[in-house]
Amino acid sequence: MHERSSVADLADKLRRELDRYSPGGKLPSSRALVDRFRVSPVTVSRALAQLAAEGLVVTRPGAGAFRAARRPSAAAPAGDTSWQEVALSADGAADLVPRSVDASGVLVSLAAPSPGVVEFNGGYLHPSLQPERAMAAALSRAGRRPGAWGRPPMEGLPELREWFARGIGGAITAAEVLVTAGGQSALAIALRALAPPGAPVLVESPTYPGMLAIARAAGLRPVPVPVDADGVRPALLADAFRATGARVFVCQPLFQNPTGAVLAPERRGEVLRIARAAGAFVVEDDFVRRLVHDDSGPLPAPLAADDPDGVVVHVGSLTKATSPSFRVSVLAARGPVLERLRAIQVVDTFFVPRPLQEAALELVGSPAWPRHLRSVSTELKARRDAMTSALRLHLPEFALPHIPSGGYHLWLRLPDGTGDTARSFGPGGEAALTAAALRAGVAITPGRPYFSAEPPAAHLRLSFAAVAGTGEIAEGVRRLRTACAQVWDARP
């Protein structure tokens, strides 16, 4: 059982038992709860913390946990917040930038399913794949380093910047690297630095919903450029630059999210040439370089390694290969743009906490790091193959145009009722299938949020990294098949 499922289950049991205790009454000790419910001390601690956050219990260090006093029955006045509708939409006649923020596409992958639901919608490694012991040891060693709790350099620790620079390659130096707090933060900094509110920004289609949310929150207008099995299509990219006057193109050249495509060798130089001719930047989101499968062969270098002219702003991260909470990433850029990136980062966050940077250095410098990467590489291939085989067995109607050799998900096209099958999902089919799947006990990600304009067809993205193993993958696909049958049977 997942740790978070155990925490939720224990919290629910304790919540139901609170009526046994009068306000101020002491709950059993943590040791007694461990013995009674056969869970770990960490699970007990987190369950009690959850109840404390709900105001149901009060924890006192060294004394234990106590039932909180009953809340007054009379509810406090709700107040009138309707004035905010005017304040949040009053942009002024000269301000044409929408100020609303839609995080729904991001929350699909961040929301934790209920206990017992197979997590095909996750965007991070399952805890069993995370280097938890190595991270804990690294954090412990980092905390004992001299000056570990002091203020770090604004740009990041020199040794960590050097390590990231070596990973990018080419002529990139440590002086051209900024340590940032996660890839999402790095992308937000890059888009704010490179495009003014109201400007167009070219994006791959389909693309990562979190990046679309960043662009729209910054008041930018995402303009889609289609991708195929070899990545973005250069001719359409050139057309989009000419038609829009855009000065930024955001792409994922390696194991693109969601298609899994790798930018073909013959297109790499062409993309850089097209952007340079347009006087534009390429934001390279190199988010899963360390989640390569062990059958992939040699990986292409980042685009930034082949860019002497400062066209590429490179984003890299340790998060996907470690833990959602290990938010250490980098921005790398050449030329005057680096100072603008640095200024925005300082204004937004000051710096990444030094203990986390020190822990990153300890982790990547330890013998456990290459062992972890090899283990993840082997396991992701096994899970990818298990999901591919299960889909072909139970859902042959789904088209799987590309099987990636890196990353953590598959991109499926739903049947549209043409060709050799009459089965289709029709308009609204993604939403209907997503809801039916959740009822059947499997959480999936619909394809619509990955498109900045009207999608050409209905799709699903299925993650094979956030589940416990190949057995859970097989069970999840069987549940998805049940959900499909329900949707198909319900259609006229």
Image (spheres, grey):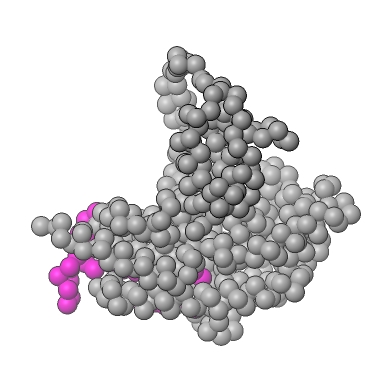
Prevalent SS, magenta region: loop
| Foreground pick, 135 / 425 | 135
Magenta residues span 400-428
Residue 32 magenta? no
| Foreground pick, 258 / 275 | 258
Residue 261: x %, y % from top left: 46, 74
Classify residue 459 by image quadrant: bottom left
Residue 206: x %, y % from top left: 40, 63
> Farthest right residue?
146
Residue at 45% across, 68% down: 464
Residue 408 magenta? yes
Residue 255: x %, y % from top left: 50, 72
Is 308 rendered above or below residue 2? below
- Determine if residue 171 is in view: no
Quadrant of the drawing holding the C terminus: bottom left
Residue at 33% across, 74% down: 391
Residue at 28% across, 73% down: 394
- Determine if residue 363 is in view: yes
Is 171 rendered above or below residue 17? below
Residue 269: x %, y % from top left: 56, 77
Q: How many numbered marks are there? A: 0
> Farthest left residue?
492
Residue at 60% across, 76% down: 375
Classify residue 282 by image quadrant: bottom right
Question: In the image, 129: left or right of 439?
Answer: right
| Foreground pick, 284 / 350 | 350
